[in-house]
Structures are given as structure tokens and as C-alpha cells.
Image (spheres, helix red, strand yellow):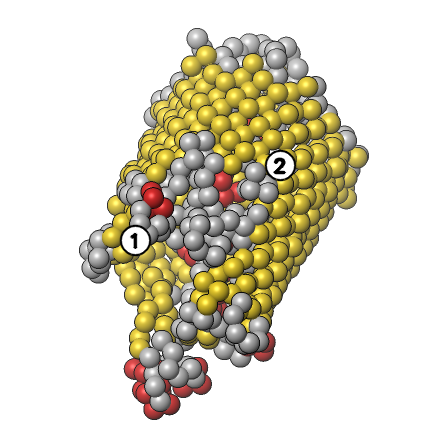
Amino acid sequence: MKQAFLVLMLLAARSGSAAPAEGRVVDLQDLPVLGVRVVVSDSSGRIVCATTTAADGTWSCPEARSMPLLVTVTGEQWERALVRIDSTGRPAVIRLRPAALLQTVVVSGSRTEELQDESAQRVEAVPRRRILATGYERVSDVLAEIPGVVTRRGGNATVAGEQIQGIESRQVAILQDGLPVPGARGVKSGVVNLHRQGTSSLQQIEVAKGAGSALYGTDAIGGVINLISREPSHPFEVEANVSGGNMGLFGADGSVGGRFGNLSVLASGGTHRMDGYRLVASSPAHVGPDWNRQDGSLRLRWALDPKLFLSVGANGYHNHEEAVNLTEQGNARGVLNDSTQAYSLTFDYVPLPSLTAQARLYRARYDENSLTTLLQGNLPPSPANLNQLYQRIDSTLGYSRAGHVVQAGAEWAQDNYRGANRLLGDNAGQQITLTDGWVQDRWAISRRATITAGGRISGHSVYGVNAVPKAGLVVRATERLLLRASYGHGFRAPDLGQLYYRFANPTNFYQVIGNPTLRPETSRSIQAGAGWRGNRWRANLTLFHNRVRGLIDSTFIGTPRTPTEAAALLAQYGVPAYYNPILNRPLYLYQNLSRVLTRGAEIDGEVLLAQNWRVRGAYTFLDARDEATRLRLAQRHRHQGFIGTEYTLPRWGVSANLRGTFYSRWLLNAASGTSAYGYRIWDLYLSKQFRGLTAYASIDNLFDSVDRKLRETPPTFDRPDFGRSFRIGMRWNFPRE
């Protein structure tokens, strides 16, 4: 079967000079197709122009006036189509056939829209249709099904630390709509708690693997997680969702909005909660806290005129947690409240079809207040607070012509932390400023090959100027085989916590201080792979090699007993005396400790076994080592896999899927060789549609997988999974999805 059925009307000759190439794209019912990509190349394979279809399906390429020409049409929901134009005259009509396996449009690999299968850097994308099909309500659960990404299920914040190809969360940039998510990561082990982040306001979740600093700046050493917000697609739309289950699980959220002439707006909000839990019955300590969270967001886009657009974004949350923890002084109750507010203002200007400009203003803050109270004794409660203020101004210019898509941008950002018992200077705070410039050129050297090259120059208020390059190549060897390769550098300056940390744990007697002599972390990432695609199947292979230099971590350096010992200990590492550690308490110091190498392979694929039955699967092999000691890195799985099958009955509105994730044994301590058991988790989801209403039920961790060490004497555990959970819910959409 041919990939697309094409009908091409011959172009009648015109008097005078040759007319520009133009045409119209329709579906099999002759209805216009909006927004598909049209690439026009000449007889040598050089790209003459690239454009997208208008609302009536038409396209035009004024630069193309010599024949013959080759027109390539690609779209998310359509099979790829190629048409040859041999003469001038009437426009060409191209009919597209719906794709059996949908492609996904992504932006996180190159900061411009491209099909996922054609990105030089491997980008995993989970669109809204797949998120809804799992029933997952938290971002961390969605990430767990992406090859090469590891999150641990459970109730505490540390499980939300994401690994990408063995690189930890501190070296991964967490973005929402391309802008950094606040969360004081620099003093919280690099973790933004995506275990609390809901999915209802998201259109897509994207994970770009490998060094991304050339496009996204500091923190993107190991990759980028980009949360893409929803936008309205109908004149008026409403959604409401409510769910509940065991473990005190409850969630309710909704949205309302629409497109009203030149204005589009979408407002959403929700609340979610879960009970705390223990894994060891004899222990009063919680593994996961009682928590509840409220979210809200607003997105507005206004066409001020046909060439100028204004966008406003606002989102925030408030989270409350309570738990009992075991400390060196006995049991203690901890209460934590944290919240964020983020606001963005974006201007998009399109003076010419080939020229775009954007300017953004962004301000975000994170506030955390905690109180620790010992349940025995008369010691007063220990309060602490932590605040982050992040401000940013950036601009981007894009130009496309004759096979080139050139982008350049400038950014200014300021990050400020303050917090009692968290930083040197406490509530006086610490601040850094970044001034960056970047450029990228995607050059289609032929119809089958595209080269991407770019780089960033970053000016840091503490570490001066640093430069990072990137390059990529995509070759369509055949219509079914795509080859890709990419190379990139990463740069991450020590964060404010690593430089100025001065934290004394109020209940467990240790302290951690920052180190102003730290060097920046750097990385180099190489990826190479191939993608095969048939009418009813697709498969991808990616080989990766990531090297990180100067990895920063805290290490025990001693327990000073006298002021003289403390001063000598600090002087040994070049730390100023005014860091003033507490006496008679173990002291940990941030240092550039490791040279890390992570390498391996990822295989993933999808096959449509029948019209309504599809199977997906993935496998990741990871070799992660400290190059200095040659020991394997702890907390990494050497083998990881995923398999899922989905069956739908559109006539009855019924959908069901079964999904499993698999993890091999993982090291707890590389030097001693201690390890944790591997495990498997299966999830089941069922749904039934009644017009615009969908009823669903899910069983997460279907076979009640928990840590095998809980069955030992005495019971212990290495992973915080609480076992099987049930949820039922209802979702209502208008208009029907």
C-alpha cells in the first residue's frame, strides 16, 4: 500500500515569467488540511523554501520559479507525501492519507517545531492523548514509562529526582513552556518535585536527552524535561475531572476557555491529596507524608493585529505536607508548606513569513516554610524558611530561507536565594546573574539530509564567560529509514546552595557548608541512532555516551572540636573562615569529586497489531561509572524496560491498556557492593465513554510489588513503593474529545 494517495493536476502554461509554486492540501474527503509542513526542493535536492498550509489548505513558495520541483508534505496525523511538479499552471492538489501511527511534533530538541522522528537529538514526547490513556495524574508517573528515564514511586520528595541516561536531576533542566520551573533546586539536592505536579493542565511532556546547554543554558548537562501547557482549540470548551481511591487519594480539577475572535484564553485549577503511609509496621516514621496541593493556571493569547501577538501566562500551587520522622533525638513531627507563583509576558512579531521575533519577560518565586517538633522532651520547635526569586528577560529572532532556519537569542537572568539556616547570610540572601547569547542554524543541505549547528556563550557573575557548542545530522536514507547523530557540550556553574550553603540539621546532628572554590561542571554528549518506520510499525535505536567532569557532591571532611581545628579544616579546602561551622558536629563540604561516564543503548518501538490493538515497548541498557575509581555508580539500574498494550472499541467507547515497567538490581553503595532488589510494576486502566463523559478505573501496581527486604527480619526497604492502589473517576469534556 502506498504511503499516500496523491492526485496532481497539471499546471497550465502562463504567458510571461514562470509562476511561483503553489498548491492545496486536502484529506481523502477533499476537506482542507491546516498546519501541515510543506517543503519544496529543486532538482538538485536543495531546499528552496519551507512553509505550512493555511486554514483553507493552501500553500505558496514564491522563491520556487524553476521546474522540476519536489514537494514533501508531513504532518502529525498524516502519512508522508511526495509530489513532483514538472510544469507551471494550475495549483497542485495533494491528498493526504491518515497515518496508522501518529507522529508527534516536538520543540525541546531544537527550540522550533519539528517532527519527533526527524530530530537530531533524541526527544521523547508524551502527548495529551497518551497521558489520558494511562489515567496518570502526576508527571513523575508519566516519566517512569519513558526509556532511559528513572523515577521512583512513593510519597516523599526525593523520589521525584529524575535520572536521564544515568545523569541525576541536578544536571537536568526542568522547564514549563521553555522557562525554568522555580523550586530552589540549588539547596534541595537538585529536585523539583514532579511527584506533586499534576498533568491536567498539560498538552505534552517532552524529554530531550543529552547535553542541552547550547539551547537552554546552565543545568541542562544531562537533558531537558519540558512541560508544555494546554491551549484551547475550540470556540468554547470545558473540562471537569474527579477521581478517588485508596490511600486517601482524591483529585478534582477542571478548565474552561475558548477562542473568541482574536483572543484565546484557558483557565484551569485543581486540588489533589493523599494520606501518609508507613512501610514498617513497628516504626512510627512515615515513608510518605500526608499531603494536599492546590494548583491554578491561566493562559491568554491576543492577536493585536495579524502580525503581532501578546501572550500572558500565570501558574502556581500551594502544597502542604505533614509526617513523623525518626531523628537522632527521637520521633519528630515535620510540617512543610511550599508554594510557587510564575508569570510570563510574551510578544510575538511576524513582519514577514520568513522572519519572526519574540520577546519574553518572566518572574517566578518559590517559598517554603517548615517546622520540626520533637514528640518527646521540652525542646522548642525548629522553624526554617527558604525563598527563591527568579527573573528573566529574553528575546529570539528567527529567519528561514532556502533551506536554512536560523535562530539567535539573548537572555538575562537573575537568581536569588535566601533562607534561615539554609544559606550563608540567611535572610540577607545570595544572588547570581547570567547574561547569555546563543545561535542555531538548521540547514537542509538536500531533501534527505539536514545539519544543525549552534552554540551559546554564557556570562556568569561568578565564573565569567563560558562557551558550549552543539551539532547534529539527520539523514533520511530511505522513505522508511532515518539516521541521526548529535554532539553537544554542557556547562553548569555551581548553584547558590553549593557555593553558599550553611545548613545545620536541627534533629540529625550533621552540617553541610558550601564551597566558593568549586569549579563548574562540564559534560559532553554523543548520540547516534536510527529510526525505522512502516505503515503499521516503527522502531528506534539510540546509542548514547555522556561524560561529566567535575561533578559536585558533598563529602564528610571531619568533626571540628575547637575554633582552631575548624579554621584549619576550612583552610585546607580554601573555604573562608566566615563560613564558621558548628563545633562538635560532623561537617560535610561540597567538592568537585567525580568524573562520571554513562553510556548505553535504548531500543523502543510500536506496532499496530490490528486496527484497534497496539503494543509499545522499550529497553535501556546503562553502564554508569565513576572514571576515577572505575566503580559503577550507585542508584542506577543496568537494565530497564517497559511494555504496554492498548485495545480500543471506538463503536462502544471502550478503551483498556496494561503497562509494565521493569528494573534490574541497583547498587546502594559502590565501594561495599551492596545492592537493592530489582522489581516489576504493572498498571491497568479501563475507560468507557458516554458522549462527552468518560468513566474510568485504574489499578496502579496491579500485583502489589513492594520491596522484598520488607519480608526480612528485621524488615527494611530501599524503595518507597506503597503497593497496590485503586482509583476510579469521571471526566467530562465539552465539546467531546
In terms of sequence position, does the residue under pointer 1 or pointer 2 come before the other? 2
Give the residue at x 24% y 55%: 670
C-alpha gap between disc 1 and disc 2: 35 Å
Could you say which is closer to the camera, residue 275 or residue 514? 275
Residue 668 shows which numbered tag? 1
Which residue appears at 52% of the width and 70% of the height?
A: 376
Q: Is residue 567 visible?
A: yes
The single residue placed furthest to the front in the displayed view is 282
At horizontal 34% and vertical 44% (from top left) the residue drawn is 711
The amino acid type, in three-letter code, at marker 1 is: Leu
Q: Residue furthest left?
A: 630
> In the image, residue 234 lies at what x, y percent?
72, 29
The quadrant of the picture occupied by the C terminus is top right
Q: What amino acid does circle 2 point to?
A: Gly
**Residue occupying image coordinates x 26% and y 45%:** 623
Q: Is residue 262 above or below residue 439?
A: above
- Quadrant into which the N terminus falls: top left
Asked which quadrant contains residue 382, the reply is bottom right
Secondary structure under badge 2? Answer: strand
* Disc assigned to residue 462: none
Label 2 belongs to which residue? 244
